[in-house]
């Protein structure tokens, strides 16, 4: 059973959506404002989000940006805003689809199924990131150094995978904390120091002078 997070401040609509989605085999979590939505996305681990843009505390576009700071969770916007620029803005920020109210339930269900299928599609086998002597296989969740497998803990892998998916680009430390540990940990910067040091001991020839896992003090990390 897939789980959907429904974010809408209209109680009647949220209730109707929940009833219909459950009738079609979905597990449903609801949130009535943006902050609750971000908390639910982190705590409930839904497979997809249905998001209204007109929320009482945050605009829906802010929720999209907040989610995209730490997750690739599919987002289907469900909004009465019909202007093309609203749709373009939402999609540019990272929404996966945009449905205009009023809507047909069958159409929404089809779009949700499609969004989840895309997100659950297996990574291509050739998705290997190379950084010097390191080969990071994102599909198989394996890393080797000079051809020898390196054993990583799940947290070490999550840290390295995030950097590998952004190879050559600075990943802000707040994003690392949100994506690896969750939104509640975005100020726990000591986690980063500990795990970066552990990764360097396993991946660098000289951990005290790293060449591949680079720290930008006060900013974040880059894999190069």
Image (cartoon, rainbow, N blue to C red):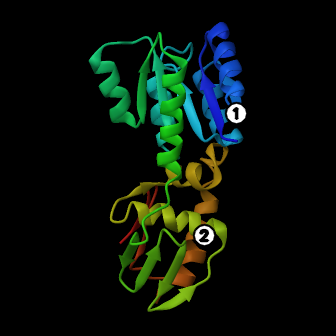
Residue 72 in view: no
Taking 73 as reference, is 84 above or below it? above
| Along the line of sight, the residue nearer the viewer: 125 or 142 | 125
Q: Position of residue 24 (x, y in %)?
A: 67, 29
Q: Position of residue 167 (x, y in %)?
A: 37, 65
Q: How many numbered marks are there?
A: 2
Q: Dividing the image into 4 quarters, which one contains the C terminus?
A: bottom left
x and y, in percent, of residue 223 in the image: 40, 69
Q: Which residue is mark 2?
A: 156
Residue 171 in view: yes
Q: In percent of the image, x 63 and y 33: which residue is there?
A: 4
Q: Quadrant of residue 44?
A: top right
Secondary structure at badge 2 equals helix
Residue 81 drawn at (x, y percent): 39, 12
In terms of image quadrants, where is residue 12? top right
| Residue at (56, 76) in percent of width and height | 199
Can you say which quadrant of the picture contains the N terminus?
top right
Disc 1 is placed on an element classified as: loop
Would you call the spot at circle 2 few (<14 residues within 10 Å), some (14-19), or many (20 or more)? some
Task: Name the residue beneath numbered marker 1.
Answer: 25
């Amino acid at each position: 059973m897939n789980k959907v997070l429904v974010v809408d401040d209209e109680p009647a609509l949220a209730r109707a959506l929940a009833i219909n989605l459950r009738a079609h085999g979905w597990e449903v979590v609801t949130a009535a404002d943006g902050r609750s939505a971000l908390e639910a996305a982190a705590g409930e681990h839904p497979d997809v989000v249905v998001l209204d843009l007109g929320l009482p505390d945050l605009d829906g576009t802010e929720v999209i940006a907040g989610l995209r700071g730490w997750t690739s969770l599919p987002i289907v916007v469900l909004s009465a805003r019909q202007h093309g620029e609203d749709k373009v803005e939402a999609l540019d920020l990272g929404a996966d689809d945009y449905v205009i109210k009023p809507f047909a339930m069958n159409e929404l269900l089809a779009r949700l199924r499609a969004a989840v299928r895309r997100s659950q599609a297996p990574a291509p086998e050739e998705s290997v990131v190379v950084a010097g002597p390191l080969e990071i296989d994102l599909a198989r969740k394996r890393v080797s150094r000079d051809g020898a497998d390196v054993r990583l803990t799940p947290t070490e892998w999550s840290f390295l995978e995030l950097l590998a998916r952004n190879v050559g680009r600075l990943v802000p430390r707040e994003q690392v904390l949100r994506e690896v540990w969750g939104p509640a940990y975005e100020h726990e910067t000591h986690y980063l120091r500990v795990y970066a040091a552990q990764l360097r001991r396993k991946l660098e020839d000289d951990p005290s002078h790293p060449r591949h896992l680079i720290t930008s003090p006060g900013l974040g990390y880059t894999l190069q």
